[in-house]
């Protein structure tokens, strides 16, 4: 693995010069990110790079000189939405020929997508994949100089570029990637194909960014990776995810740490012991199980059984009192039978998740599952989904109601739904609404939990 530094001046002097030659006033960019937090964080870096070369940012595509869609490829529906949104820009481009339209992120790392854009979307000017953010100034520069479209074919770069400028969306919650890519090849998932092999950032680079965030007053720092528990593969000297957590927790300051995602096959007892020992780590584990049938787990290439998964949950409950869990579930994986699905419902009941992220299986060309027979009808799948949601609602409402009476520390994130209220998040990831004035946003507050509205807690300042 090659670790590179983003050197602002070298990269950008030429681009900045071209931009000031082409535009009388600083051009505006509209950047929209779809999908997971990793992608949102990439979007923040894209904005940072654009600001660095002289762009301003805007909230409306109509105002923009550059529109960039930072896309997600995990499910087909998201891809269709992007094509729809790109298609809708045709008229705008006709009215404003100087408008530059770009597409980047996971979709741009699929060959057939780039081909489709090349063929059927002649007004798309720029296409680059997930590893291309640091090269954006050169791509823009090329587009401005040559009056030719710059559509890059998908390619994976075995490099990590550090210190790419960033414009974060929040002043108190930050995303911090610790690794990129995925080596797991779950059979339904496109991520390993579009994001490439796992690459871990060096501990010193992560620590430097982390310390910068703490110094800047960030309260919640979420460490990101497709599979954080395999952090460190290939690094010298050897370091694992728990070691990294311990190193970060030693940084003094008023903050807490979350992380995602943990793959159950690699979530170790050592990790759980670390959560127990470090008060700065939230007592919440996002541990996607995907389904409750051993037969399907094997078909999904997940490398654990329901029993192993439950053992881990049990160990965590024993070791970290009060810990809560959330999970991802796929309904309607190819060949899922009623019996498989009932096993998923049983597992969900057994664990008692605070939160579930549920997805109907989406076929992704190029993955192994796309070749598996999938006779279950759409109607059966949506019926199962409804049953799952009903089951989970009942579980979550009970768990939420059980919290009432406690006084807890929350990070105040914004305004609540009811007039005059604020919304905050507990250590365990639940949301609470309480009456207070907006000056608390971005701060910690002590809140007494007095009731609940469905799965949202209600409280008052303690
Ligand atoms: N169809 C449906 N859900 C998927 N996920 C990943 N790939 C697919 C797919 N093809 C879900 C998994 C994963 C989450 C991020 O997205 O549950 O954990
Ligand atoms: Fe996809 Fe599995 Fe990797 Fe997660 S661990 S990104 S579900 S292949």
Image (tube, rainbow, N blue to C red):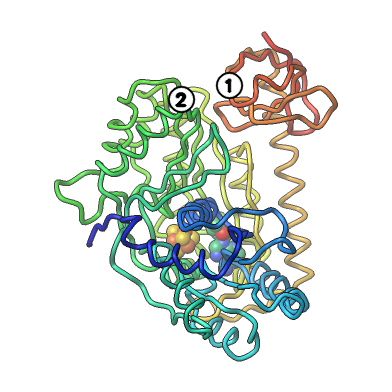
Taking the image as shown, residue 51 lies to the left or right of residue 436, namely left
Residue, far bottom: 119
* Residue depicted at 45% across the width and 77% down the height: 142
* Residue depicted at 55% across the width and 27% down the height: 427
**Residue closest to the eye, 237 or 251:** 251
| Mark 2 surroundings: few (<14), some (14-19) or many (≥20) residues within 10 A | many
Q: Do we see residue 34 in this rendering?
A: no
Q: Which residue is mark 1?
A: 443
- The percent coordinates of residue 388 (x first, y second) are 71, 51
Taking the image as shown, residue 271 lies to the left or right of residue 122, namely left
- The percent coordinates of residue 318 (x first, y second) are 44, 26
| Mark 1 surroundings: few (<14), some (14-19) or many (≥20) residues within 10 A | some
* Residue depicted at 55% across the width and 53% down the height: 40
Residue, far top: 462
- The percent coordinates of residue 322 (x first, y second) are 52, 24
Q: In the rendered image of this protein, does residue 25 appear above or below residue 156? A: above
Q: In the rendered image of this protein, does residue 223 appear above or below residue 316? A: below
Q: Quadrant of the C terminus?
A: top right
**Secondary structure of the residue carrying numbered label 1:** loop
Question: Label 1 near label 2: C-beta < 8 Å?
Answer: no
Q: Quadrant of the N terminus?
A: bottom left
Q: Which mark is residue 255?
A: 2
Choose the circle earlier in sequence order: 2 or 1: 2
């Amino acid at each position: 693995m090659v670790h590179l530094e983003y050197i602002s001046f070298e990269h950008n002097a030429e681009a900045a010069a071209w931009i000031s030659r082409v535009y009388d006033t600083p051009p505006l960019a509209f950047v929209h990110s779809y999908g997971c937090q990793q992608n949102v964080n990439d979007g923040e870096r894209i904005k940072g790079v654009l600001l660095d070369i002289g762009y301003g940012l805007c909230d409306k595509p109509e105002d923009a000189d550059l529109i960039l869609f930072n896309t997600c490829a995990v499910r087909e529906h998201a891809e269709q939405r992007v094509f729809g949104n790109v298609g809708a820009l045709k008229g705008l481009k006709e009215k404003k020929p100087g408008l530059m339209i770009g597409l980047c992120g996971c979709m741009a790392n699929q060959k057939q997508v780039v081909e489709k854009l090349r063929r059927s979307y002649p007004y798309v000017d720029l296409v680059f994949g997930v590893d291309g953010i640091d090269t954006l100034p050169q791509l823009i520069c090329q587009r401005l100089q040559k009056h030719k479209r710059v559509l890059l074919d998908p390619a994976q770069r075995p490099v990590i570029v550090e210190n790419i400028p960033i414009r974060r969306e929040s002043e108190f919650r930050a995303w911090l990637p610790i690794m990129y890519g995925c080596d797991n090849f779950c059979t339904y998932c496109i991520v390993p194909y579009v994001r490439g092999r796992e690459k871990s950032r060096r501990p010193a680079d992560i620590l430097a960014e982390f310390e910068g965030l703490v110094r800047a007053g960030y309260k919640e720092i979420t460490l990101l990776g497709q599979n954080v528990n395999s952090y460190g593969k290939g690094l010298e000297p050897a370091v694992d995810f728990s070691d990294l957590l311990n190193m970060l927790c030693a940084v003094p300051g008023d903050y807490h740490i979350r992380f995602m995602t943990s793959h159950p096959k690699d979530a170790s007892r050592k990790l759980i012991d670390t959560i127990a020992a470090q008060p700065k780590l939230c007592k919440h584990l996002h541990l996607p199980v995907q389904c409750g049938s051993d037969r399907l787990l094997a078909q999904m290439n997940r490398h654990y059984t329901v029993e192993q998964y439950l053992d881990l949950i049990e160990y965590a409950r024993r070791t970290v009192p009060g810990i809560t869990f959330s999970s991802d579930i796929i309904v309607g994986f190819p060949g899922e039978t009623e019996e498989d699905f009932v096993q998923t419902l049983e597992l969900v009941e057994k664990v008692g998740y605070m939160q579930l992220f549920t997805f109907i299986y989406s076929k992704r060309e190029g993955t192994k599952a796309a070749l598996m027979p999938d006779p279950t009808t759409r109607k059966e799948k949506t019926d199962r989904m409804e049953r799952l949601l009903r089951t989970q609602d009942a579980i979550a409402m009970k768990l939420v109601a059980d919290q009432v009476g406690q006084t807890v520390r929350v990070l105040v994130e914004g305004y609540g739904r009811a007039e005059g209220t604020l919304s905050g998040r507990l250590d365990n990831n639940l949301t609470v609404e309480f009456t207070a004035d907006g000056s608390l946003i971005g701060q910690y507050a002590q809140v007494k939990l007095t009731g609940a509205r469905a799965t949202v807690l209600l409280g008052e300042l303690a």
